[in-house]
Image: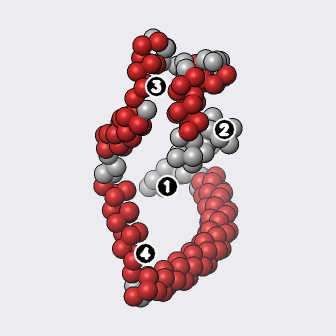
Amino acid sequence: MRISINLATRPFIELRPRFARLRLAMVALVVVAVALGFWLHALNGRAKVAQAQMNALKAKTQQFQQERQANEARMRQPQNMAVLERSQFLNELFANKSFSWTAVMMDLERDYEGRRSQYPAACERRARSGGAVGEESGDIAAIRGSTAGQRGGREAAGRQPEWDAGNAARSGGVRHSERI
């Protein structure tokens, strides 16, 4: 019989498997570090390209701003002041959205009343005949023909006027003059 005597003050621990795992972890970290290094290099390359594009855009912007300043200086010359004032007025008008549809409708009504007073007999006959809103009598067609030159000759050119487009769509594409 053999008696074993352990003279160690601490229990024996096998370190070789731990060192193997530690070496494996270090290799994995080195591989990750190399991959991150390549990724950083590629990212720096893309950043340089993006910076070059940004510099080109800044240069173009600077060029356009200089061109704009030159154009503004040209517009401030005395011979171009009228155009500048008109454009500033229109820009303010559009910016304030101060276009009044009410005023436009009132102008149209005034224009209509003026035309109606020019041809009172035809308007009275039309009212007495009980013509429908979309229909024209021969008198109204005559009035329209005599005033075609005043409105730019749209009817004389054979085109349907814009204000007739809705009635033509409702009547299946038939013009008022075709229904007479």
Q: Secondary structure at mark 4?
A: helix
Q: Secondary structure at mark 3?
A: helix
Q: Which one is closest to the eye, mark 4 or mark 3? A: 3
Front-most of residues 165 and 152: 152
Which residue position is annotated with label 4? 83
Quarter of the picture containing the C terminus is top right
Q: Position of residue 102 (x, y in %)?
A: 31, 40
Nearer the N terminus, badge 2 or badge 4? Answer: 4
Nearer the N terminus, badge 1 or badge 4? Answer: 1
Front-most of residues 98 and 121: 121
Front-most of residues 79 and 38: 79
Q: Position of residue 172 (x, y in %)?
A: 65, 18
Identity, as a three-letter code, of the amino acid under mark 4: Val
Spatial CA span between label 4 and label 3: 46 Å
Nearer the N terminus, badge 3 or badge 1? Answer: 1
Identity, as a three-letter code, of the amino acid under mark 1: Leu
Q: Which numbered disc covers residue 51?
A: none
Q: Which numbered disc covers residue 7?
A: 1
> Residue at (42%, 17%) from the top-left corner?
127
> Residue at (38%, 63%) from the top-left corner?
91
Which residue position is annotated with label 3? 122
Spatial CA span between label 1 and label 4: 108 Å
Q: Would you identify the image quadrant in which residue 35 lies? A: bottom right
Q: Which one is closest to the eye, mark 2 or mark 4? A: 2
